[in-house]
Image (tube, rainbow, N blue to C red):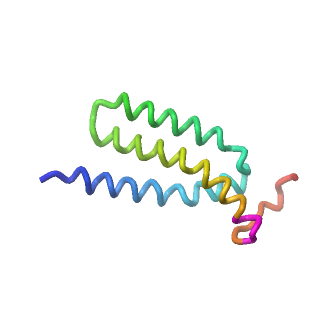
Amino acid sequence: MNFSGILTAGISFLVIGIFHPIVIWAEYYFTKRCWPVFLAAGVICLGLSVCSGREMPSVFLGVLGCTFLWSIQELYEQEERVKKGWFPENSNRQK
């Protein structure tokens, strides 16, 4: 029996679920200007995924890298959600 597909789905579900609050937190404290950190982390994870010699660590790093990259778009969308009033704005942030 091969459980790698189910394990990959579980890893994807977990990583994406963890990144929702991370994006909200990052936009709240750092605004969308923190996107280069997400870009660098995504590229590093994807690079490590390619270099990994084992299947599951490679899958994990690949999913993590793509999630970092997708989070860049989510930062911009989170800013729009804050403007609409769906999420609180950081009142301590200087404009």
Provide residue 66's location: percent of width, then percent of height: 47, 45
Q: Quick check: 94 left or right of 16?
A: right
Residue drawn at point x = 50 percent, y = 33 percent? 44
Residue drawn at point x = 31 percent, y = 52 percent? 8
Q: Quick check: 73 left or right of 81?
A: left
Residue drawn at point x = 54 percent, y = 49 percent? 70
Provide residue 39's location: percent of width, then percent of height: 58, 39
Say if 56 sits above or below 84 in the image.
Answer: above
Q: Quick check: 68 left or right of 92?
A: left
User: In the picture, residue 35 is in which quadrant?
Assistant: top right
Provide residue 5's location: percent of width, then percent of height: 25, 53
Count the marks: 0
Provide residue 24's location: percent of width, then percent of height: 64, 59
Say if 85 sits above or below 59 in the image.
Answer: below
Residue drawn at point x = 71 percent, y = 57 percent? 28
Magenta-drawn stretch contains 4: no
Which residue is situated farthest in the left direction here? 1
Which residue is situated farthest in the right direction here? 95
Span highlighted in magenta in the image? 81-85
User: In the picture, residue 79 is in which quadrant?
Assistant: bottom right
Magenta-colored segment: predominant secondary structure: helix
